[in-house]
Image: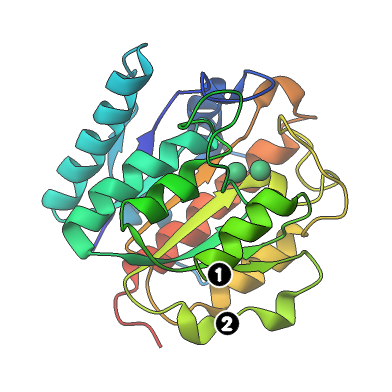
Amino acid sequence: MTVALLGFAWDASSSYARGAALAPPVIRSLLFDEASSPYSLSGEDIREAISVYDFDPLPEEPGKARAAIEERTARVIDSGKAPLSLGGDHSITYPILRAVRDAHGPVNILHIDAHPDLYEEFGGDRYSHACPFARAIEDGCIGKLVQIGIRSAGPEQRAFSEKHGVIMLGADDLDRIPYDDLVAPLYVSVDLDGLDPAFAPGVSHPEPGGLSTRDVLSMLAKLRAAPIGADIVELNPTCDVHLATARVAARLVKELASAMTKNGRP
Ligand code: MN
Ligand code: MN
C-alpha cells in the first residue's frame, strides 16, 4: 500500500493561537529539500512511498470544512491509499477518524499529545481542537485509545478517560505503553506539543516536560502493526525557531509513511 499525503490547512478550531493552518506547505517543502534525506531510518525511499498529494484548500465554514476533510479522507481510502494527514489544529482528526471508521471499523490509536483532547466542549465549541477524541469515541470510531505525553489533564478529562477506558500516560511512562493493545487496525495521531518544547517549540500550546524526538521515533519503531492512517498536527510555523519543529514533522512524515507501507510487519 502507498501513502496519500493530505494537507488540511485549518486552525479556526484552535482555542488560543492561530497559525497551524500555515503548516502543511511548510512541512511539504522540507520533505525532500536538499538539506535532508529522502529516506526513512530503515532505508525506505519516501519519494516512492508517497504516491498522492492533496493540499487543496478547505471551505471556511467549520461544518463544511469537517465534511470536506471526511470526504477527502474517504476518497483516498477508497482508492487503496493510506491517508497521512498534516494539520492544521487537532480538530481535523475527528472527521478523519469518521472516514477511517467507515472503511476499517473502530481503530486502535496511539495518540501522542500534551493534552488528552477529551473535553465535552471547549469555549462553547464541541468540535474544538480540545475535543476530537471525545467526539470520535462517541461516534464509535475508536477501539483502544492509548495516549502518551499527557501533562495537562484535569478532573473532567480524567473522568471521561476512566469512563471510556482510555489509557492515559505521561511523558515518563514510555515503558508502560501497551503495544499489545496497539494492533490492527491501527491509527497514529501525533500532536507535536506532545514533544518537549526543547524539541518542538513551534506549537500554540507548549507544555514543558515532554517527549523527545527520539522517544517518538522509538515508539513508532516498536509498533506491531502497519498503521492504516496517521496525522501530524498543531505545528504553528509562526512560533517555530529556525524550522526546528517543522523538521521534526518532516522526519515523522517519513517514519510514518515508511511504517504505513509495511503491511503485516512483525
Ligand atoms: Mn491535541
Ligand atoms: Mn496538544
Q: Is residue 36 visible?
A: no
Tag 1: residue type? Leu
Residue 167: x, y in percent?
59, 71
Q: Earlier in the sequence, mark 1 or mark 2?
A: 2
Residue 68 is left or right of residue 39, and the answer is left
Q: Is residue 116 visible?
A: yes
Q: How much space separates mark 1 and mark 2, taking CA atoms?
A: 13 Å
The residue sitting at 64% across, 52% down in the picture is 157
The residue sitting at 19% across, 44% down in the picture is 74
Q: Quadrant of the N terminus?
A: bottom left
Residue 252: x, y in percent?
56, 53
Residue 123: x, y in percent?
61, 24
Tag 2: residue type? Pro
Q: Nearer the viewer, residue 235 or 241?
A: 235
Relative vertical location of residue 176 with respect to residue 75 in this rendering, above or below? below
| SS assignment at label 1 | helix
Residue at far left of view: 78
The residue sitting at 52% across, 45% down in the picture is 232
Q: Nearer the viewer, residue 106 or 175?
A: 106
Residue 45: x, y in percent?
41, 59
| SS assignment at label 2 | loop
Residue 198 is left or right of residue 69, and the answer is right
Relative vertical location of residue 194 with respect to residue 122 in this rendering, above or below? below
Q: Which residue corresponds to mark 2?
A: 178
